[in-house]
Amino acid sequence: MSRKTSQLTKFAEFDIADLDSATKSITQNPGNLGGKWIALRVDGSVAGIDSAEFEAFDEALAEHGADNVDVVLIVDSKESSEVLAAWEAAKTDAPASVLAKLPDVDGKACRYVALTGKQVADSLPTKDSDEDQLSDKDRKALRTGITNFVRENAEDVRGARAEIQAAVTEQSAAKAFSGSLALDSATDRLQVTCESSLEDVVAEIDLSSDPTGTPDNPVVVEKLQTERDSALSEFAAASSKGGFGKLLAKSKIKNAGDQLLAATDSLVGARASELIEALIIKAEPLLVRARTDAQVREFDRAIADLAKATDAAATNLTQALGIDSGAIERPWTSGTPQPRHYVVAEAQVLDQLDLSIDATKVPTQDFEGVYVLQAQHALSAAALTANLTT
């Protein structure tokens, strides 16, 4: 468990292999136990402890430590820091166990608690901060995506422009007028098509890719519209002559046709830029919303996965310390009290974990990640010495 603070102030810690030192400390300095909890570190199993030394330790607690010690925690040495940190988080503001004050049939206090635990996650799912604006790179990628979409859907515009090209080649004013009207209509249809498909376009834009280019800056469309209309009129005037006059005006007709095509292309480009700029303004909030929705979905999936992992971790915890909780006879209950589970995590994530296990949620700011603690309460000395021979 990753701790944000490093002080454990509630524990007097001893190695269970050195019970003699622990007993002397309790006997000689009962007021200096370091708090209301004693932790006995076990190297793999309690099987190696000396039963006589443990009985002396238990008697010293009964005689000298009853008022100073709430419970004695049995923890695996390799996991003691993580397990004790989780216990401290769970029990700082609550009594460890009222069961510790109750005796077994031999009058021995059920003051021992066997602890085991598991780190479920080192870090917690987080939601990115909600931003109402895109970065410069995102905005460029958005521009590229919309520009490409407009270009891909401009087939009617390209067709109408080709009609004007053919009219210029044929020196036909009527066809040039017809092509220009078709071009304006195609451009209007393109705008409607792009606006109606905007949400789908936004959904497909990949902000992770590098933008490939941007269109020209928008210019005043009305001015270019006037220039196109003027060029169209000049072409019509030059090409409307017939016979020998048209032959003499061939160069003038060509120049007027070239000007008409140039003015047409400028108008098409300006209208496309204007359309793209308008679409970007409309698309940006859609993209921000889509990104936020995706982040929420990802967060919800991560929380659901974390809840499943937490359930699995708690379900699979076993007490591997060689403690026989069934060896105790308790006059105040039938059977062995079930282990309790605690889930320790930061409050904002813990509140959202939908767990199927019966566990006490422990909100804290002292740790990072999620930790599951299992506590087998109400153990007397008999549980630790049941498998020992004197």
Image: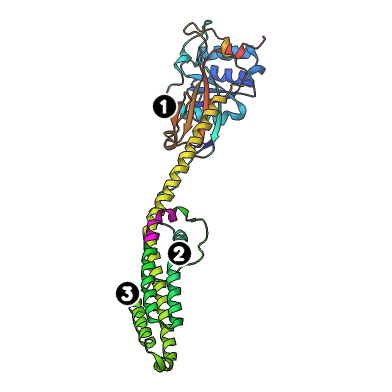
Give the magenta range. 192-202
Can see residue 238?
yes
Placement of 183 over or under 9, stated as above or below: below
Q: Is residue 75 magenta?
A: no
Placement of 84 over or under 173, stated as above or below: above
**Label number found at residue 151:** none
Calculate the distance from the C-alpha at mark 1 to the C-alpha at mark 2.
61 Å
Residue on which disc 1 sits: 93
Quadrant location of residue 260?
bottom left
Query: Which secondary structure is most common in the magenta stretch?
Result: helix
Can see residue 56?
no
361 left or right of 318?
left
State which mark lies toward you, 1 or 2.
2
Badges 1 and 3: C-beta atoms under 8 Å apart? Answer: no
Local SS, label 3: helix
State which mark lies toward you, 1 or 3.
3
